[in-house]
Image (spheres, rainbow, N blue to C red):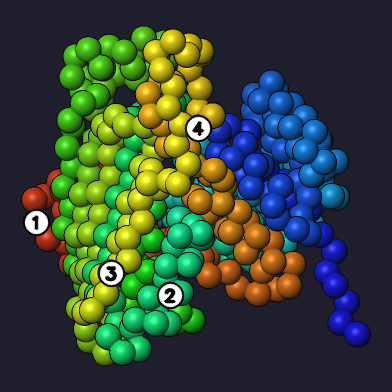
Amino acid sequence: MMQTPPPLRIGFVGAGFIAHFHLKSFLSVRNAVITGVFSPTPRKRQALADAVNAAELGPCRPHDSLESLVGADDVDALWILSPNDTRLDVMRTLEQAVKAGRSKIRAVACEKPLGRTLAEAREVLALATSAGLAHGYLENQVFSTAVERGKEIIWRRAAPTGGRPYLARAAEEHSGPHEAWFWQGKLQGGGVMSDMMCHSVEVGRFLLTAPGAPRASLTVKSVQGSVGHLKWTQPRYAERLANTYGGAVQMRAHPVEDFARATITLEDADGAELIVEASTSWAYVGPGLRIDLALLGPEYAMEFSSLNSGLKVFLSREITGGEGEDLVEKQNAEQGQMPIIEDEAGVYGYIGENRHMVDCFRHGRTPIETFEDGVEVVRMVMALYKSAETGRTVMADEDLDTYVPVPAR
Protein backbone atom coordinates (compact mmCIF):
# COMPACT_ATOMS: atom_id res chain seq x y z
CA MET A 1 0.00 0.00 0.00
CA MET A 2 1.47 3.35 -1.09
CA GLN A 3 2.05 5.74 1.79
CA THR A 4 0.43 9.19 1.46
CA PRO A 5 2.93 12.03 1.89
CA PRO A 6 2.23 14.36 4.84
CA PRO A 7 0.94 17.90 4.27
CA LEU A 8 3.52 20.33 2.89
CA ARG A 9 4.62 22.87 5.51
CA ILE A 10 5.27 26.20 3.83
CA GLY A 11 7.14 29.30 4.90
CA PHE A 12 6.34 32.67 3.30
CA VAL A 13 9.11 35.20 2.63
CA GLY A 14 7.27 38.49 2.29
CA ALA A 15 4.02 39.71 3.83
CA GLY A 16 2.74 42.26 1.31
CA PHE A 17 -0.14 42.35 -1.16
CA ILE A 18 0.84 39.24 -3.12
CA ALA A 19 1.39 37.18 0.04
CA HIS A 20 -2.17 37.90 1.15
CA PHE A 21 -3.40 36.93 -2.34
CA HIS A 22 -1.58 33.61 -2.01
CA LEU A 23 -3.05 33.13 1.45
CA LYS A 24 -6.55 33.56 0.01
CA SER A 25 -5.83 30.87 -2.58
CA PHE A 26 -4.60 28.36 0.01
CA LEU A 27 -8.12 28.20 1.43
CA SER A 28 -8.82 26.01 -1.63
CA VAL A 29 -5.59 23.95 -1.58
CA ARG A 30 -5.47 20.59 0.16
CA ASN A 31 -2.52 19.04 2.01
CA ALA A 32 -0.71 22.30 2.76
CA VAL A 33 -0.22 24.44 5.83
CA ILE A 34 1.57 27.77 6.22
CA THR A 35 3.76 27.44 9.28
CA GLY A 36 5.99 30.51 9.16
CA VAL A 37 6.40 33.95 7.71
CA PHE A 38 9.27 36.42 7.55
CA SER A 39 9.09 40.09 6.65
CA PRO A 40 11.53 42.78 7.78
CA THR A 41 8.49 44.77 8.93
CA PRO A 42 7.25 43.38 12.29
CA ARG A 43 3.72 44.72 11.82
CA LYS A 44 3.34 43.04 8.42
CA ARG A 45 4.69 39.64 9.42
CA GLN A 46 2.51 39.56 12.54
CA ALA A 47 -0.58 40.58 10.53
CA LEU A 48 0.00 37.83 7.96
CA ALA A 49 0.65 35.20 10.64
CA ASP A 50 -2.55 36.26 12.39
CA ALA A 51 -4.47 36.00 9.10
CA VAL A 52 -3.09 32.49 8.46
CA ASN A 53 -4.11 31.36 11.93
CA ALA A 54 -7.55 32.97 11.63
CA ALA A 55 -8.02 31.01 8.39
CA GLU A 56 -6.98 27.82 10.22
CA LEU A 57 -4.14 27.23 7.75
CA GLY A 58 -1.41 27.12 10.40
CA PRO A 59 -0.31 27.12 13.11
CA CYS A 60 1.86 29.92 11.75
CA ARG A 61 4.43 31.97 13.60
CA PRO A 62 6.24 35.14 12.54
CA HIS A 63 10.04 35.01 12.31
CA ASP A 64 12.24 38.02 13.01
CA SER A 65 14.92 36.93 10.52
CA LEU A 66 15.15 35.03 7.27
CA GLU A 67 17.70 32.70 8.86
CA SER A 68 15.16 31.79 11.55
CA LEU A 69 12.49 30.91 8.98
CA VAL A 70 14.89 28.93 6.78
CA GLY A 71 16.19 27.00 9.78
CA ALA A 72 12.80 26.21 11.29
CA ASP A 73 12.02 22.53 11.89
CA ASP A 74 8.45 22.94 10.69
CA VAL A 75 9.14 24.34 7.18
CA ASP A 76 9.49 22.00 4.17
CA ALA A 77 9.18 24.54 1.36
CA LEU A 78 9.74 28.25 0.87
CA TRP A 79 7.45 30.58 -1.10
CA ILE A 80 9.50 33.67 -2.11
CA LEU A 81 6.99 36.54 -2.29
CA SER A 82 9.26 39.46 -1.36
CA PRO A 83 10.19 42.43 -3.61
CA ASN A 84 12.29 41.78 -6.73
CA ASP A 85 15.52 43.22 -5.33
CA THR A 86 15.50 40.79 -2.37
CA ARG A 87 14.97 37.46 -4.13
CA LEU A 88 18.56 36.69 -5.04
CA ASP A 89 19.72 37.30 -1.46
CA VAL A 90 16.92 35.06 -0.18
CA MET A 91 18.11 32.27 -2.46
CA ARG A 92 21.73 32.75 -1.39
CA THR A 93 20.73 32.46 2.26
CA LEU A 94 18.62 29.38 1.55
CA GLU A 95 21.32 27.63 -0.48
CA GLN A 96 23.96 28.21 2.20
CA ALA A 97 21.69 26.97 4.98
CA VAL A 98 20.64 23.81 3.11
CA LYS A 99 24.20 22.88 2.12
CA ALA A 100 25.44 23.51 5.67
CA GLY A 101 22.72 21.28 7.12
CA ARG A 102 21.01 24.17 8.93
CA SER A 103 17.78 23.87 6.92
CA LYS A 104 15.38 21.01 6.16
CA ILE A 105 13.77 22.85 3.26
CA ARG A 106 13.57 20.68 0.16
CA ALA A 107 11.57 22.84 -2.28
CA VAL A 108 11.23 26.48 -3.24
CA ALA A 109 8.69 28.44 -5.28
CA CYS A 110 9.28 32.02 -6.43
CA GLU A 111 6.96 34.76 -7.66
CA LYS A 112 7.57 36.44 -11.00
CA PRO A 113 10.00 37.60 -12.25
CA LEU A 114 12.78 35.23 -11.24
CA GLY A 115 15.33 38.04 -11.48
CA ARG A 116 15.72 41.68 -12.48
CA THR A 117 18.26 40.65 -15.13
CA LEU A 118 19.15 37.46 -16.94
CA ALA A 119 22.29 37.15 -14.81
CA GLU A 120 20.19 37.30 -11.62
CA ALA A 121 17.66 34.77 -12.90
CA ARG A 122 20.41 32.36 -13.89
CA GLU A 123 22.00 32.64 -10.45
CA VAL A 124 18.66 31.94 -8.75
CA LEU A 125 18.36 28.74 -10.81
CA ALA A 126 21.98 27.79 -10.14
CA LEU A 127 21.51 28.23 -6.38
CA ALA A 128 18.42 26.02 -6.34
CA THR A 129 20.28 23.37 -8.34
CA SER A 130 23.35 23.60 -6.12
CA ALA A 131 21.22 23.01 -3.02
CA GLY A 132 19.35 20.10 -4.64
CA LEU A 133 16.00 21.86 -4.24
CA ALA A 134 12.86 21.15 -6.20
CA HIS A 135 11.72 24.44 -7.71
CA GLY A 136 8.60 25.98 -9.16
CA TYR A 137 8.06 29.32 -10.94
CA LEU A 138 4.84 31.00 -9.76
CA GLU A 139 3.28 32.21 -13.03
CA ASN A 140 -0.36 32.39 -12.04
CA GLN A 141 -1.88 33.18 -15.46
CA VAL A 142 -0.80 29.78 -16.80
CA PHE A 143 -3.09 28.28 -14.14
CA SER A 144 -6.03 30.62 -14.73
CA THR A 145 -9.29 28.67 -14.88
CA ALA A 146 -10.06 30.18 -18.31
CA VAL A 147 -6.58 29.37 -19.66
CA GLU A 148 -6.64 25.77 -18.44
CA ARG A 149 -10.14 25.08 -19.77
CA GLY A 150 -9.71 27.02 -23.01
CA LYS A 151 -6.39 25.40 -23.90
CA GLU A 152 -7.75 21.93 -23.19
CA ILE A 153 -10.74 22.45 -25.48
CA ILE A 154 -8.77 24.03 -28.34
CA TRP A 155 -6.08 21.35 -28.42
CA ARG A 156 -8.58 18.48 -27.99
CA ARG A 157 -11.41 19.58 -30.30
CA ALA A 158 -9.97 22.07 -32.80
CA ALA A 159 -6.28 21.38 -33.34
CA PRO A 160 -6.51 17.70 -34.42
CA THR A 161 -8.60 18.55 -37.51
CA GLY A 162 -7.95 22.28 -38.00
CA GLY A 163 -4.21 22.33 -37.32
CA ARG A 164 -2.18 23.65 -34.39
CA PRO A 165 -2.79 27.20 -33.09
CA TYR A 166 -0.32 29.75 -34.41
CA LEU A 167 -1.09 33.10 -32.76
CA ALA A 168 -1.51 33.93 -29.08
CA ARG A 169 -2.46 37.40 -27.88
CA ALA A 170 -2.14 38.53 -24.28
CA ALA A 171 -2.76 41.89 -22.65
CA GLU A 172 -2.74 42.96 -19.03
CA GLU A 173 -3.36 46.46 -17.75
CA HIS A 174 -4.37 48.43 -14.72
CA SER A 175 -3.94 51.91 -13.29
CA GLY A 176 -0.58 51.36 -11.62
CA PRO A 177 1.03 49.55 -8.66
CA HIS A 178 0.43 50.54 -5.05
CA GLU A 179 3.92 50.01 -3.59
CA ALA A 180 6.80 52.47 -4.06
CA TRP A 181 9.39 49.88 -5.11
CA PHE A 182 7.42 48.94 -8.25
CA TRP A 183 8.01 52.48 -9.57
CA GLN A 184 11.76 52.44 -8.85
CA GLY A 185 13.72 50.96 -11.75
CA LYS A 186 16.72 49.79 -9.75
CA LEU A 187 14.59 47.94 -7.20
CA GLN A 188 11.94 46.51 -9.51
CA GLY A 189 14.19 45.94 -12.54
CA GLY A 190 12.29 48.23 -14.90
CA GLY A 191 8.71 49.39 -15.34
CA VAL A 192 5.60 47.68 -16.65
CA MET A 193 7.65 45.54 -19.07
CA SER A 194 9.42 43.88 -16.16
CA ASP A 195 6.37 43.85 -13.89
CA MET A 196 3.66 42.53 -16.21
CA MET A 197 5.09 41.44 -19.57
CA CYS A 198 6.50 38.38 -17.82
CA HIS A 199 2.88 37.22 -17.39
CA SER A 200 1.84 37.91 -20.96
CA VAL A 201 4.74 36.32 -22.82
CA GLU A 202 4.61 33.16 -20.71
CA VAL A 203 0.87 32.61 -20.91
CA GLY A 204 1.14 33.13 -24.68
CA ARG A 205 3.96 30.62 -24.95
CA PHE A 206 2.01 28.17 -22.78
CA LEU A 207 -1.13 28.38 -24.92
CA LEU A 208 0.91 27.66 -28.07
CA THR A 209 2.64 24.63 -26.51
CA ALA A 210 0.98 21.29 -27.19
CA PRO A 211 -0.43 19.61 -24.05
CA GLY A 212 2.18 17.36 -22.48
CA ALA A 213 5.01 18.76 -24.61
CA PRO A 214 7.96 20.45 -22.89
CA ARG A 215 8.11 24.21 -23.16
CA ALA A 216 11.45 23.73 -24.95
CA SER A 217 9.49 22.23 -27.86
CA LEU A 218 9.00 25.84 -28.98
CA THR A 219 12.08 27.84 -29.88
CA VAL A 220 12.16 31.64 -29.64
CA LYS A 221 13.60 33.02 -32.88
CA SER A 222 13.31 36.81 -32.51
CA VAL A 223 11.64 39.55 -30.46
CA GLN A 224 10.50 43.10 -31.11
CA GLY A 225 9.64 45.39 -28.25
CA SER A 226 8.64 48.99 -27.64
CA VAL A 227 7.86 51.05 -24.56
CA GLY A 228 5.96 54.23 -23.84
CA HIS A 229 5.81 56.86 -21.10
CA LEU A 230 2.17 57.82 -21.51
CA LYS A 231 0.73 58.97 -18.18
CA TRP A 232 2.92 58.84 -15.10
CA THR A 233 5.70 61.12 -16.37
CA GLN A 234 3.19 63.93 -16.94
CA PRO A 235 3.90 66.62 -14.32
CA ARG A 236 0.66 66.31 -12.34
CA TYR A 237 0.82 62.52 -12.17
CA ALA A 238 4.54 62.47 -11.37
CA GLU A 239 3.81 64.91 -8.54
CA ARG A 240 0.99 62.68 -7.30
CA LEU A 241 3.36 59.69 -7.09
CA ALA A 242 6.02 61.75 -5.33
CA ASN A 243 3.48 62.93 -2.75
CA THR A 244 1.99 59.45 -2.28
CA TYR A 245 5.37 57.84 -1.56
CA GLY A 246 7.04 60.63 0.39
CA GLY A 247 9.38 61.60 -2.44
CA ALA A 248 10.69 58.05 -2.94
CA VAL A 249 9.28 57.91 -6.49
CA GLN A 250 10.58 60.57 -8.90
CA MET A 251 9.17 59.77 -12.32
CA ARG A 252 10.43 62.95 -13.98
CA ALA A 253 14.04 62.38 -12.91
CA HIS A 254 14.00 58.57 -13.02
CA PRO A 255 11.21 57.50 -15.39
CA VAL A 256 10.05 53.93 -15.89
CA GLU A 257 7.78 52.89 -18.75
CA ASP A 258 4.03 52.60 -18.14
CA PHE A 259 3.27 50.95 -21.49
CA ALA A 260 5.01 48.09 -23.31
CA ARG A 261 4.38 46.07 -26.45
CA ALA A 262 5.94 42.80 -27.62
CA THR A 263 6.00 40.61 -30.70
CA ILE A 264 7.76 37.28 -30.20
CA THR A 265 8.33 34.89 -33.09
CA LEU A 266 8.73 31.21 -32.25
CA GLU A 267 9.12 27.96 -34.13
CA ASP A 268 7.77 24.52 -33.27
CA ALA A 269 9.53 21.18 -33.77
CA ASP A 270 8.16 20.94 -37.33
CA GLY A 271 9.46 24.39 -38.29
CA ALA A 272 6.05 26.11 -38.23
CA GLU A 273 6.13 29.83 -37.39
CA LEU A 274 4.22 30.93 -34.29
CA ILE A 275 3.70 34.39 -32.83
CA VAL A 276 2.95 35.85 -29.40
CA GLU A 277 1.60 39.40 -29.41
CA ALA A 278 1.45 41.09 -26.02
CA SER A 279 0.88 44.49 -24.46
CA THR A 280 0.92 45.71 -20.87
CA SER A 281 0.04 49.01 -19.27
CA TRP A 282 -0.07 50.93 -16.01
CA ALA A 283 -2.08 53.65 -17.77
CA TYR A 284 -5.48 51.95 -18.00
CA VAL A 285 -8.29 53.57 -16.03
CA GLY A 286 -11.30 51.26 -16.07
CA PRO A 287 -13.14 49.21 -13.45
CA GLY A 288 -9.92 47.47 -12.41
CA LEU A 289 -7.29 44.98 -13.55
CA ARG A 290 -8.04 43.75 -17.07
CA ILE A 291 -6.59 40.58 -18.62
CA ASP A 292 -7.40 39.85 -22.28
CA LEU A 293 -6.27 36.59 -23.88
CA ALA A 294 -6.81 35.02 -27.30
CA LEU A 295 -5.59 31.90 -29.10
CA LEU A 296 -6.05 31.66 -32.88
CA GLY A 297 -5.67 28.79 -35.30
CA PRO A 298 -6.59 27.99 -38.93
CA GLU A 299 -10.31 27.41 -38.25
CA TYR A 300 -10.94 28.56 -34.69
CA ALA A 301 -10.36 31.15 -31.97
CA MET A 302 -10.47 31.29 -28.17
CA GLU A 303 -11.04 34.57 -26.31
CA PHE A 304 -11.15 35.60 -22.66
CA SER A 305 -11.49 38.97 -20.90
CA SER A 306 -11.39 39.08 -17.12
CA LEU A 307 -13.71 42.09 -16.89
CA ASN A 308 -16.46 40.44 -18.97
CA SER A 309 -17.74 38.77 -15.86
CA GLY A 310 -21.17 37.27 -15.46
CA LEU A 311 -21.77 39.20 -12.25
CA LYS A 312 -22.19 42.98 -12.21
CA VAL A 313 -23.64 45.50 -9.79
CA PHE A 314 -24.76 49.09 -10.25
CA LEU A 315 -24.30 51.65 -7.47
CA SER A 316 -25.80 55.13 -7.88
CA ARG A 317 -24.11 58.32 -6.74
CA GLU A 318 -26.27 58.17 -3.63
CA ILE A 319 -24.32 55.11 -2.45
CA THR A 320 -21.15 56.35 -0.78
CA GLY A 321 -18.27 54.62 0.92
CA GLY A 322 -14.51 54.46 1.25
CA GLU A 323 -12.11 53.32 -1.44
CA GLY A 324 -11.31 49.64 -1.66
CA GLU A 325 -10.73 46.59 -3.85
CA ASP A 326 -13.64 44.45 -2.75
CA LEU A 327 -15.04 43.93 -6.27
CA VAL A 328 -11.95 43.56 -8.47
CA GLU A 329 -8.18 44.01 -8.09
CA LYS A 330 -6.94 47.57 -8.77
CA GLN A 331 -10.54 48.83 -8.49
CA ASN A 332 -10.80 52.45 -9.68
CA ALA A 333 -14.35 53.40 -8.69
CA GLU A 334 -16.99 52.73 -6.06
CA GLN A 335 -20.01 53.88 -8.09
CA GLY A 336 -21.60 53.07 -11.45
CA GLN A 337 -21.86 49.66 -13.10
CA MET A 338 -19.09 47.47 -11.80
CA PRO A 339 -17.97 44.00 -12.92
CA ILE A 340 -17.25 41.63 -10.07
CA ILE A 341 -14.69 38.84 -10.22
CA GLU A 342 -16.49 36.22 -8.13
CA ASP A 343 -13.30 34.31 -7.27
CA GLU A 344 -10.17 36.30 -8.04
CA ALA A 345 -7.84 33.66 -6.60
CA GLY A 346 -9.28 31.10 -9.01
CA VAL A 347 -9.86 33.26 -12.10
CA TYR A 348 -6.35 34.72 -11.91
CA GLY A 349 -4.79 31.27 -11.38
CA TYR A 350 -3.45 31.44 -7.82
CA ILE A 351 -5.46 28.46 -6.61
CA GLY A 352 -4.39 26.33 -9.56
CA GLU A 353 -0.71 27.20 -9.32
CA ASN A 354 -0.48 26.61 -5.57
CA ARG A 355 -2.46 23.37 -5.78
CA HIS A 356 -0.08 22.22 -8.55
CA MET A 357 3.11 23.22 -6.72
CA VAL A 358 2.01 21.59 -3.47
CA ASP A 359 1.08 18.36 -5.29
CA CYS A 360 4.39 18.26 -7.19
CA PHE A 361 6.55 19.01 -4.15
CA ARG A 362 4.74 16.43 -2.01
CA HIS A 363 4.99 13.65 -4.60
CA GLY A 364 8.40 14.44 -6.09
CA ARG A 365 7.08 15.48 -9.50
CA THR A 366 8.44 18.30 -11.67
CA PRO A 367 6.08 21.30 -11.95
CA ILE A 368 5.03 22.51 -15.39
CA GLU A 369 6.61 25.88 -14.47
CA THR A 370 10.13 25.64 -13.06
CA PHE A 371 12.99 28.06 -12.54
CA GLU A 372 14.19 27.05 -16.03
CA ASP A 373 10.99 28.58 -17.39
CA GLY A 374 11.54 31.62 -15.18
CA VAL A 375 14.99 32.10 -16.72
CA GLU A 376 13.55 31.86 -20.24
CA VAL A 377 10.88 34.45 -19.39
CA VAL A 378 13.52 36.88 -18.12
CA ARG A 379 15.54 36.23 -21.30
CA MET A 380 12.54 37.24 -23.42
CA VAL A 381 11.88 40.34 -21.30
CA MET A 382 15.53 41.42 -21.51
CA ALA A 383 15.47 40.96 -25.29
CA LEU A 384 12.32 43.10 -25.44
CA TYR A 385 13.97 45.85 -23.41
CA LYS A 386 17.03 45.75 -25.67
CA SER A 387 14.82 45.89 -28.76
CA ALA A 388 12.98 48.89 -27.34
CA GLU A 389 16.27 50.62 -26.50
CA THR A 390 17.97 49.96 -29.85
CA GLY A 391 14.93 50.17 -32.12
CA ARG A 392 15.66 46.86 -33.86
CA THR A 393 14.66 43.23 -33.81
CA VAL A 394 16.70 41.19 -31.32
CA MET A 395 17.57 37.64 -32.34
CA ALA A 396 17.32 34.81 -29.83
CA ASP A 397 21.05 34.00 -29.92
CA GLU A 398 22.17 37.50 -28.88
CA ASP A 399 24.19 37.73 -25.66
CA LEU A 400 22.02 39.27 -22.92
CA ASP A 401 24.01 38.03 -19.92
CA THR A 402 25.24 41.48 -18.91
CA TYR A 403 22.32 43.53 -20.22
CA VAL A 404 20.51 45.83 -17.78
CA PRO A 405 17.37 47.69 -18.94
CA VAL A 406 17.49 51.48 -19.23
CA PRO A 407 15.15 52.20 -16.27
CA ALA A 408 17.25 49.94 -14.02
CA ARG A 409 20.42 51.75 -15.06
Q: Is residue 269 left or right of residue 96?
A: left
Q: Name the element at disc 1.
A: loop
Rendered residue at 60%/73% (across/down): 366
Query: Looking at this rendering, what residue extends furthest in the left direction?
Result: 391
Give the crowd class for mark 2: few <14, some 14-19, many >=20 residues within 10 Å.
Answer: few
Mark 1 and mark 4: Cα distance apart in space: 41 Å
Query: Can you say which quadrant of the picture contains the N terminus?
Result: bottom right
When the figure is inspected, residue 263 is found, relative to residue 73, above or below; the finding is below
Q: Which residue is mark 3?
A: 301
When the figure is inspected, residue 231 is found, relative to residue 360, above or below; the finding is above
Q: Nearer the viewer, residue 331 or 33?
A: 331
Give the crowd class for mark 1: few <14, some 14-19, many >=20 residues within 10 Å.
Answer: some
Along the polypeptide, which appears first: circle 1 or circle 4?
Answer: 4
Q: Position of residue 192 (x, y in %)?
A: 31, 40
Along the polypeptide, which appears first: circle 4 or circle 3?
Answer: 3
Q: Nearer the viewer, residue 224 or 293?
A: 293
Give the crowd class for mark 3: few <14, some 14-19, many >=20 residues within 10 Å.
Answer: some
Answer whether residue 280 is visible to the viewer in this image: yes
Q: Is residue 401 left or right of residue 82?
A: left
When the figure is inspected, residue 280 is found, relative to residue 351, above or below; the finding is above
Mark 4 and mark 3: Cα distance apart in space: 29 Å
Along the polypeptide, which appears first: circle 3 or circle 1?
Answer: 3
